[in-house]
């Protein structure tokens, strides 16, 4: 059978939208994992950081499940949810609705463009869990917020939280950012290790000013990506906890693929949810030829491209120039 696919990105963290409602296929998780591995291969197929499977929901407008490029399933994906939100919004003619994800049903909304007429969506990131069991992180402590862990590094301080996918966050200077430490740590924590038995998304953060940070993430199940929405949201939350930013005030988060805004929402003294606001860009349309016996991809064909990337790249270029000037200033 033939199925239409959309290649899209949020902050250049790229995905393939696979609408299960458009097919008569009865996929099981093993099929979804295998399809993700096949389609995400940048040499032999379309190439992406993950596949967003859209299906029917019993309690929301639709359901989104996310499979990383290595076939593992993620409980949440912020950049992916913006893309899924746009897809469902345009498919069903809606601006504001909820989407069921693996562990939570989340609000999404089309909002004012971040730059020129880039399609922009705000998505809810929640629940926010600080208990280390939620990651899980095996450690003799209930939480880890801005604490040194000498077994990991002699001077860096670490924070760990789940939203609900797991994140490890540390502040670094521009010199550490450009070195090999992040890759070494992330590879250690995402292979057999005594701390993170399910792996973890590892972010290095460089704060520029009160409401401005840079975040680079080595993603579990993928490797370095241009941006990770849940990591940028979690890193913004850490800024608020450390009183470098305030709840309710947008934080500009720069990444290797562009920029987003994050707003931390507090309710009755507790961190309730984060609004992640950024682009949802569709770049290409494909058709997949799927074998109905094995439920696997036989091949894909490129149907057409859009011109949305041209506008997005103008924003990304402006962000890149701003970023280089900021990183140079942090270096001096
Ligand atoms: N890029 C995503 C997160 C994708 C999942 C992550 N690799 C995991 O396994 O938790 C985002 O934008 O949040």
Image: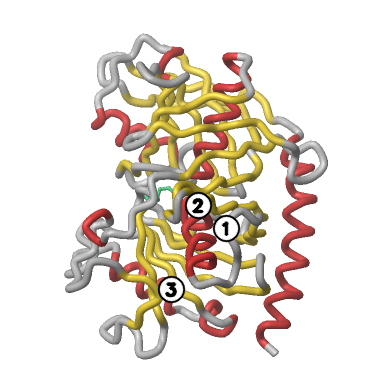
Mark pair 3, 1: CA separation? 28 Å
Say which residue appears at 46% left-offset and 14% top-offset. 2
Residue 201 image-quadrant placement: bottom left
Residue contact between numbered discs 3 and 1, judged by CB atoms under 8 Å: no
Say which residue appears at 35% left-offset and 50% top-offset. 165
Residue 103 appears in the rendering: yes
* Disc 3, SS: helix
Q: How many dots with numbers?
A: 3
- Dot 1: few (<14), some (14–19), or many (≥20) neighbours within 10 Å? some
* Disc 2, SS: strand
Say which residue label 3 marks: 182
Q: Give the answer, above or below, for where 122 lies relative to 5.
A: below
129 horizontally vs 323: left or right: left
Say which residue label 2 marks: 266
Mark pair 2, 3: CA separation? 31 Å
For label 1, being within 8 Å of ligand 1 is answered no
Residue contact between numbered discs 2 and 1, judged by CB atoms under 8 Å: yes
* Disc 1, SS: loop
Residue 249 image-quadrant placement: bottom right
Residue 51 in percent (x, y) is at: 43, 36
The circle on residue 247 is 1
100 horizontally vs 31: left or right: right
101 horizontally vs 89: left or right: left
Q: Give the answer, above or below, for where 211 lies relative to 221.
A: below
């Amino acid at each position: 059978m033939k199925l239409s696919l959309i290649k899209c990105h949020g902050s250049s963290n790229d995905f393939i939208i696979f609408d299960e409602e458009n097919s008569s296929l009865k996929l099981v998780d093993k099929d979804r994992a295998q399809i993700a591995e096949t389609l995400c291969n940048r040499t032999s197929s379309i190439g992406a950081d993950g596949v967003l499977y859209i299906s029917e929901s019993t309690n929301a407008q639709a359901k989104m499940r996310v499979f990383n490029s290595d076939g593992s399933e993620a409980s949440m994906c912020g950049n992916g949810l913006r893309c899924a939100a746009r897809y469902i919004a345009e498919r069903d003619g809606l601006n504001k609705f909820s989407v069921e994800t693996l562990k939570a049903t989340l609000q999404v909304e089309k909002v004012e463009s971040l730059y020129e007429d880039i399609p922009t969506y705000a998505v809810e990131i929640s629940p926010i869990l600080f208990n280390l069991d939620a990651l899980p992180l095996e450690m003799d402590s209930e939480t880890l917020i801005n604490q040194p862990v000498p077994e990991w590094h002699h001077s860096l301080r670490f924070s760990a939280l789940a939203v609900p996918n797991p994140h490890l966050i540390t502040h670094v200077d521009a010199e550490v950012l450009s070195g090999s430490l992040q890759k070494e740590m992330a590879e250690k924590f995402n292979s057999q290790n005594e701390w993170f038995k399910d792996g973890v998304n590892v972010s290095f953060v460089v704060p520029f000013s009160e409401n401005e940070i840079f975040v680079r993430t080595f993603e579990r199940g993928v490797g370095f990506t241009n941006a990770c929405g849940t990591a940028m949201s979690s890193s913004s939350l850490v800024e608020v906890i450390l009183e470098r930013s305030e709840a309710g005030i947008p934080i500009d988060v720069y990444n290797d693929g562009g920029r987003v805004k994050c707003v931390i929402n507090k309710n009755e003294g507790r961190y309730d949810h984060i609004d992640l606001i950024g682009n949802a860009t569709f770049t290409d349309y494909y058709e997949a030829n799927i074998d109905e016996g094995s439920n696997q991809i036989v091949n894909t064909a490129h149907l057409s491209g859009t011109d949305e990337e041209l506008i997005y790249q103008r924003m990304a270029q402006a962000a890149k120039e701003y970023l280089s000037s900021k990183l140079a200033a942090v270096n001096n």
